[in-house]
Amino acid sequence: MEQQFNNREYVALLIRKVLIGALTVAEAVKNFPFDTGDKSIEAAYHALVHYEADEDLRRRDFMYREEQDEYMEMISQSLERGENLPDNIIRNYQKYYPESNIPHSHNKAGAIRSFLRFLNIK
């Protein structure tokens, strides 16, 4: 349980650093804890990837950017408190991504494992 809480606090910190511009999304994603089995961390990972994917829309639509920033801040605050993310958020990402593509480890073997999972090869 303690490790799960520490992982959530760490992910909350990564998200907050992205929101203030201290880290890029790519840097944050690269440093996510791997193989946690924590559905809240996996959902946060997907939310962060979507945050990056919406960069053009965020630039064009101020209201969308504000809403997405508030959403990411809510995720960060929940994780920082050690709470599960709401079930609807987790289910929404699981519907499209049954498994997250968080790197398994921060070395070549982990990168290869993640790439194979990305290709849907187990």
Image: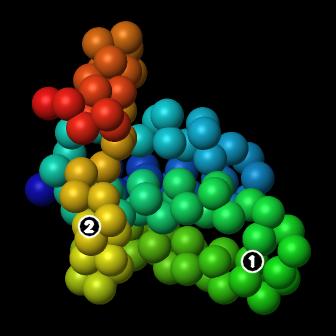
Residue at horizontal 37 percent and vertical 21 percent from the top:
111
Q: Which type of secondary structure does the marked residue at label 2 adopt?
A: helix
Q: Badge 2: few (under 14), some or many (20 or more) residues near its Cα, within 10 Å?
A: some
Horizontal placement of 20 versus 62: left or right?
left
Q: Which residue is mark 1?
A: 65
Residue 40 at x, y percent in the picture: 29, 65
Residue at horizontal 31 percent and vertical 34 percent from the top:
119
99 or 103: nearer the eye?
99
Q: Closer to us: mark 1 or mark 2?
A: 2
6 or 38: nearer the eye?
38
Looking at the rendered structure, the kind of residue marked 2 is Gln
Q: Quadrant of residue 97?
A: bottom left
55 or 86: nearer the eye?
55
Residue at horizontal 37 percent and vertical 14 percent from the top:
107
Residue at horizontal 41 percent and vertical 41 percent from the top:
32
Please indicate, yes or no, whether residue 40 appears anywhere in the rendered image.
no
Q: Above or below — where is 37 with respect to 88? A: above
Residue 121 at x, y percent in the picture: 20, 31
Q: Badge 1: few (under 14), some or many (20 or more) residues near its Cα, within 10 Å?
A: some
Horizontal placement of 14 versus 7: left or right?
right
User: Looking at the image, is mark 1 or mark 2 earlier in the sequence?
Assistant: 1
